[in-house]
Amino acid sequence: MPQVLSVLALRKKFGDKFAVDGISFEVNHNEIVGLLGPNGAGKTTTINMILGVLEPTAGTIRIEGRDVASERAQALECTNFTAVYAPLPGNLTVYQNLRVFALIYDVKHSAARIQELLEQFDLVAYRDVKCGLLSSGEQTRAALAKAMLNRPRLLLLDEPTASLDPSKAREIRAQILELARRDGVGVLWTSHNMIEVQEVCDRVLFLSRGTILLEGDPKTLPREHGKSSLEDLFVSVAREPLTLEAG
């Protein structure tokens, strides 16, 4: 079985600057990988290339063995995502949004699937409320419900719990962990919450200036680089990437 996601020598150049500069990594089935780094490190550009929104300058991306460049539709039919910068259309209700995306993803038995997700993400009471009128936390839950519609094999999550209160965030983390373990889903997760990352991620990749600077187990990686916590390591990557690379 191929990796759910394989990225090889990926580059993206804007003008004379590389936003992503030759990165390679994989995400396996049943695995949650954290894509970490300061703002401007290349995380969102990487995700947009995986989704086919941006065309790479060089390199290859494969999802379930399918090349995104030549088999985009087949690769993306088993992929979904949610991001704080991509809210659901505010003029549609929660149900209408889920219905539209169910049609886009050709979800079978969509009415039952939508009801299941409304219950799973505590959205039954907001079924007929326009998404633009929801609180930020409610919008986040609606977007996560959308991301689960097609039972993706690859799930891309960009700050998935940023707007949630601690109780809801814990529930969402538990649901995503269960999804990865039970259904063999591969998850690429970006977050600035290092406690969350350490709790959910099997591996982490630290991006700095468009390259992967560090990779490893989030529970042991800080000690390997002389840091007491993942947050301390994150700060060091942001402030002193060249020093860490040399080490």
Image (spheres, helix red, strand yellow):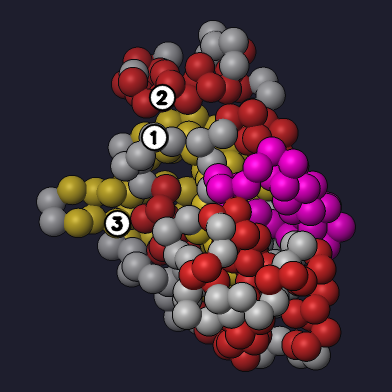
Q: Foreground mark, 2 or 3?
A: 2
* Mark closer to the chain start, 2 or 3: 3
**Front-lying residue, 149 or 141:** 141
The quadrant of the picture occupied by the N terminus is: bottom right
Instruction: State the predominant SS element of the stretch in magenta.
Output: helix
| Residue 89 seen in this snapshot | yes
Mark 3: few/some/many CA within 10 Å (<14, 14-19, 20+): many
Measuring 69% from the left and 57% from the top, which residue is drawn there?
186
In the image, the segment drawn in magenta is 160-189
Residue 215, x across and y down, in percent: 55, 33
Residue on which disc 1 sits: 38
Q: Is residue 69 above or below residue 186?
A: below
* Mark closer to the chain start, 1 or 2: 1
Residue 110, x across and y down, in percent: 75, 87
In the picture, measured across the screen, residue 38 lies left or right of residue 220, that is: left
Task: Work out which residue is located at the far right of the displayed protein and give it.
Answer: 182
